[in-house]
Amino acid sequence: MSKPPPGVRRDFPLDRLTTVRTGGAAELFARAGNDAALSELLGWAASAGAPVSVVGSGSNLLVADDGVAGLVIKLDGDLADIAVDAPRIVCGGGARLPAVAASAARAGLAGIEFGVNIPGTVGGAVRMNANAYGGELGRVLEWVEIATADGLQRRAPEELGLGYRRSSIADGEVVARAAMLLEPSDPEAVKAILGEMRRRRHEAQPQGIRTFGSTFKNPEDPRAEGRSAGLLLADAGCGGLTIGGARFAPKHANFIENTGSATTAEVVAVMAEGRRRVLERFGVELEPEVQTLGELRLPWR
Ligand SMILES: Cc1cc2nc3c(=O)[nH]c(=O)nc-3n(C[C@H](O)[C@H](O)[C@H](O)COP(=O)(O)OP(=O)(O)OC[C@H]3O[C@@H](n4cnc5c(N)ncnc54)[C@H](O)[C@@H]3O)c2cc1C
């Protein structure tokens, strides 16, 4: 392997870059603050045969306890900027969604209010097609710039394979930047919506816990009879189910909480038990929403 570009760190712990705070280290880790730095990293990784992955805010991420082979990149600097050019907002892939929602509100732009409660970055939100309260990222996206070792490519939302909490963005493709086309509105009205959404979220979800949000997607299976994954898990008696330092949160059974020093293996064991109980009780196979980094074997796959 040729010498990596300056700033690349070895054996970099990733637990602190995730909201659940579990998992091992990246073999190689680097921050990229602009297009040139990102391009240099991607070019080097391709020539060295090192797989590339990206971590955003780590708010939907489970990192393998044995760590992650290859190069893990986190975007910051210019690649986390938010530039308002009404009615458009152009964001680096590393920009945080609540900050984007707040900037839009200050500028009197409506359409991205739902982002106020999503503790992820624009890149993670594009990859996951984040949604909440009837809003969905895919509906406000104008274009997305994807970086690979071959350069930057601009894609329209129709080219992103967006669906319920998914996209066709492949491993190794980095969302460097995204533009959202928003609706001009009254700043005070948009701010009031943000406040209302924060209040509703505060009531519905446990606060201040180490979690990656929804563990499983809401099922489309008719046997679920319209119930959410959280309701199915609660009805199957999973609220508070604990293995080691990981448990289904008592207030929200689709959230797994790291109560102290959980390992990713313990989180996976809680997932597997919850999934088993829902399958046994209702015949519904829950599919994980949480994304994984590293060699992580989910026991039912
Ligand atoms: C308390 C809580 C509440 C949540 N509520 C919601 C909600 O209401 N709606 C919702 O949709 N989600 C919600 N989530 C989940 C999560 O915040 C979203 O999925 C978010 O979009 C993930 O962004 P991230 O930057 O944290 O991505 P990460 O968790 O870091 O990564 C997720 C995936 O995206 C990839 N990725 C990250 N950045 C990039 C990039 N720049 N380019 C390419 N790929 C990238 C990663 O490799 C990984 O595959 C919640 C999470 C928590 C903890």
Image (cartoon, helix red, strand yellow):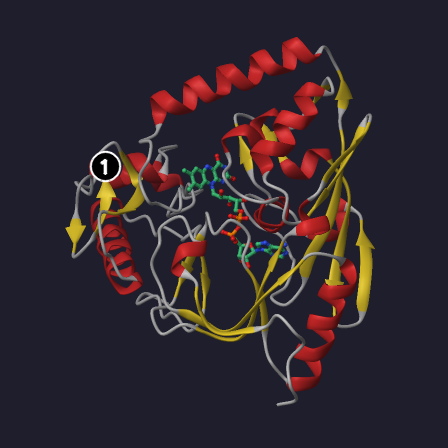
Q: Which quadrant is home to the N terminus?
A: bottom right
Of residue 252 and residue 147, the one placed in the foreground of this image is: 147
Residue 244 x %, y %: 16, 57
The residue type indicated by label 1 comes to Ala
Residue at 63% of width from left, 68% of height from top? 172
Residue 126 x %, y %: 63, 47
Label 1 neighbour load within 10 Å: few <14, some 14-19, many 20+: many
Residue at 30% of width from left, 67% of height from top? 299
Res 210 quadrant in image? top left
Residue at 17% of width from left, 46% of height from top? 241
Determine whether 240 is above or below 30 in the image. above
Residue at 82% of width from left, 26% of height from top? 86
Whether residue 300 sits left or right of residue 260 in the image: it is: right
Residue behind mark 1: 234
The number of numbered discs placed on residues in the rendered structure image is: 1
Residue 257 x %, y %: 28, 45
Residue 73 x %, y %: 59, 64
Of residue 87 and residue 268, the one placed in the foreground of this image is: 87
Whether residue 170 sits left or right of residue 272 in the image: it is: right
Judged from the image, the secondary structure of the residue bearing numbered disc 1 is helix
Determine whether 265 is above or below 96 in the image. below
Determine whether 31 is above or below 9 in the image. above
Of residue 140 and residue 195, the one placed in the foreground of this image is: 195
